[in-house]
Amino acid sequence: MELTGWGRFPRFETRLYEPSSPEAAARLQPLLSGFAPRGNGRAYGDAAIGVTASILSRGLGRFRHFDPAERRLTVESGVLLSEIIDAFLPRGFFPPVVPGTQFVSVGGMIASDIHGKNHHGAGGFGDHVDAFELALPGGEIRICSPGQNADLFKATIGGMGLTGTILSASFKLIPVESALIAQETIVAQNLDEAIAALSAHEDWPYSAAWIDCLASGAALGRSLIYLGRHAKAADIAAIDPHRRPAGKKRPLGVPIDLPGFTLNRLSVAAFNELYFRKGASAAGKPFLNGIGSFFFPLDGVLNWNRIYGRRGFLQHQCVIGTDAAAGAIAEILGRFAKRGNASFLAVLKKLGPAGRGYLSFPKPGFTLALDLAMDRGVFEFLDEIDDIVVAAGGRIYLAKDARQSRATFEAGYPELDRFREIRREIGAERAVASRLSDRLGI
Amino acid sequence: MDEPKFLLVLGGGSDIGRACALRFAQAGWRVTLAGRDLAPLKREAEDIATRTGVAITTSFIDILDTPSFAAFETGLGGLPDAIVCVVGLLGDARRAETDPAHASLVMRSNFEGPALLLGQFAEGFAERGEGVIVGVSSVAGDRGRASNYVYGAAKAGLTAFLSGLRNRFGKTKIRVVTVKPGFVRTKMTAGMKLPPPLTAEPQEVAEAIYRASAVKPRDVIYVKPVWRLIMTIIGSIPEPIFKRLKL
């Protein structure tokens, strides 16, 4: 059947398999050639579309064990982050790292070495994984950890599923005193202020900047900086019970594809202006926010990817090293502002140390993420943006990517050769192939 | 705190059984999953125990091995507060028409085994004066149809058995609930084309069972209410017409 990523571009035919257990997934692999594992399909581009076959991890959806003393949770790889939060937040535990959506699978979080608003202090999800079980292409099951099959461990974290199917994983949860986030918002009038503010507030566990990417000139990079920490019992006791935010709300949905004209320069500019003013008016006043609206604001609108219509959309996310970041990001934002392409969300975030994986995306610096509608010239435009990224020594996030060139990819990931070598050693070279690995020659 | 209540799920490896166990465990019940295949049952037990922090155990039962029922009950280490029976076998309807051994297997799996086992627990409940029995039967038992009448007849037997038990305990604190889920998206129906408005998810069935047994007592539940209407219509068609229909 036809599959796409979350961005709904590109579309490819693939055969779908849905093994009902980790053992069944391992047994299935040697029967397939050119397969890729697929979690909950939240990678934006072509990472989870197998060239001939795709192995869904939905049937690998069981929790295995929780050790309260160590706070270590072991689950099968198809378990969703939302299920972990539902089960453990009421018991006072939270995942160590969460991305911008809770509808990702644990296998997907490892394969993409996802990062969250706490990367500057906590690192990526891969940094918190103690061990996982990996089914090699031939079906053998290997336990991988920093001390056991360490090379496979490093290849699989951030490895986009290209070493085989992750069957289960163990990682530590963090203790929290409440289901709420104590939040503060800061206004930054331009990019320099935003970068300075993100660096000045590294003592907050969670931080990210929302950029109005239609602001230009002296206001280029105008943004709201969101700072957050898990609220303590005392924070909550200080608030009037009737005014406490709800922990989790039932999301609205976008039931059908919206026509392409819904998003245009004027509507987005109006939205951004409104959003910025609303945020700015609340700036400086600390308040308590629900986990959902702080970490997963877009999950509040189910299937929000449909607002871009059937043609889908692209997301561009790069990271630029600390020294070159201000200059390169100013240039990228300038190009976006000039082009006026609709961007629903533009996020700037400071990243901490590099990830553990050979193909991990995070490295010290700043990451910028933007959405783009599929309009004329968008591919050529993004190629120009990539030139800026490469010149500044940056890289593009594979979990978001649907279109970068091989040259851009190879320039950004210096440990690619080691990754390819390991793929050869375990017989994954042809056996495990996604549309992404095919496109990028991995 | 009160001692947690005890649920026994017969057919705990099924999708509906698993969903029921999770729903009751979320409400603080301790659960024993009973079934024939212990390895997958242990996987479900660990899943539910880890999600809820509640103790979940497993127990071996072969629903065709009726002489083992007494030992099975003793091995549970206590009489359950509620029992949900999801044991069943769809079988191959065509084969059941001509192969008596297969027909017998379908009849025994859907009627004889579940009825005898629930009947045995009903005696324990009668002695204690309290208990809830939930039997998952089927709309297929409401009227025999050409497409699967062996299965339907066995389920009709179970429905009648549950109805009889309910009548027997009608004036006591023992409750008997008959569940007719209609189409459910499970391993049993994987690959079938099911009409979405008539098809329930296992979680919906579990929620309905939990409500009917622990929140708002009910006697007979159709998970999707539209099934009650459909089965009323099917039940009211006169036999001379019904026998000519292809259903």
Image (tube, rainbow, N blue to C red):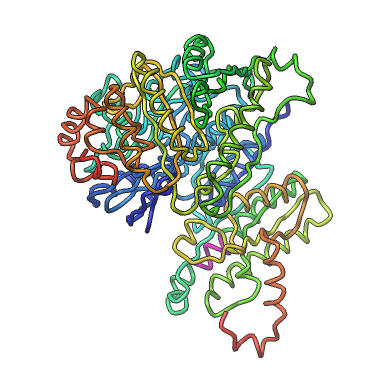
Which residues are the magenta region? B106-113
Depicted A125 relative to depicted B144: above or below = above
* Residue B200, percent from left and from top: 60, 57
Depicted A117 relative to depicted A435: above or below = above
* Residue B5, percent from left and from top: 68, 37
| The magenta stretch spans residue B112 | yes
Residue at x 33% of width, y 57% of height: A13
Query: Can residue A200 be seen from the camera position used here?
Result: yes
* Residue B175, percent from left and from top: 75, 52
- In the foreground, A195 or A135: A195
- In the foreground, B120 or A203: A203
A342 vs A357, left or right, is right
* Residue B81, percent from left and from top: 69, 42
Depicted A379 relative to depicted A358: above or below = below
Residue at x 59% of width, y 17% of height: A186
Q: For the N terminus of chain B, which image quadrant?
A: top right
